[in-house]
Image (tube, rainbow, N blue to C red):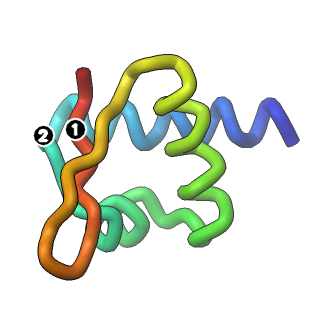
Amino acid sequence: MKEKIGTNAGIIWAYLDAEGSKPLKEIKKACKLTEKDMYAALGWLAREGKIAFNELKDDLQVVLL
């Protein structure tokens, strides 16, 4: 499971690196991850200090640090 989370974190990181900050809905769709897998990967990236979150009206925006 840990390996899968790390792989998904890499997918999200690469997407944000190429596309810039994005809302959670767009990340989930573009990276083709389940909600559970996306949140686990985002937790990994947040714990590593690689991302930050900005509150939007109806979503969260994820930003690379």
Is there CB contact under 8 Å for labels 2 and 1? no
Q: Is residue 50 left or right of residue 9?
A: left
- The picture quadrant where one finds residue 44 is top right
Q: Residue at x 26, y 72 (%)?
A: 59
Q: Nearer the viewer, residue 41 or 19?
A: 41
Q: Compare marks 2 and 1 and give the one earlier in the sequence.
A: 2
Please rate how many residues cluster around mark 1, counting C-alpha atoms within 10 Å: few if below 14, some from 14 to 19, many from 20.
some
Residue 28 vertical position relative to residue 21 in the rendered view, above or below: below
Dot 2 amino acid type: Gly
Identify residue for label 1.
63
Q: Residue at x 87, y 42 (%)?
A: 1
Task: Name the outermost residue toward the bottom.
Answer: 58
| Residue 45 locus on image (x, y percent) | 50, 30
| Gap between marks 2 and 1 measured at Cα | 7 Å
Dot 1 amino acid type: Val
| Residue 50 locus on image (x, y percent) | 38, 22
Identify residue for label 2.
20
Secondary element at image label 2: loop
Task: Name the outermost residue toward the right.
Answer: 1
Q: Residue at x 27, y 62 (%)?
A: 60
Q: Nearer the viewer, residue 24 or 59?
A: 59
Q: Is residue 47 left or right of residue 21?
A: right
Numbered tag placed on residue 41 in the rendering:
none
Secondary element at image label 1: strand
| Residue 57 locus on image (x, y percent) | 13, 77
- The picture quadrant where one finds residue 56 is bottom left
Q: Residue at x 60, y 70 (%)?
A: 34
Which of discs 2 and 1 lies nearer the camera? The answer is 1
Residue 43 vertical position relative to residue 61 in the rendered view, above or below: above
Q: Quadrant of the C terminus?
A: top left
Please rate how many residues cluster around mark 2, counting C-alpha atoms within 10 Å: few if below 14, some from 14 to 19, many from 20.
few
Residue 30 vertical position relative to residue 7 in the rendered view, above or below: below
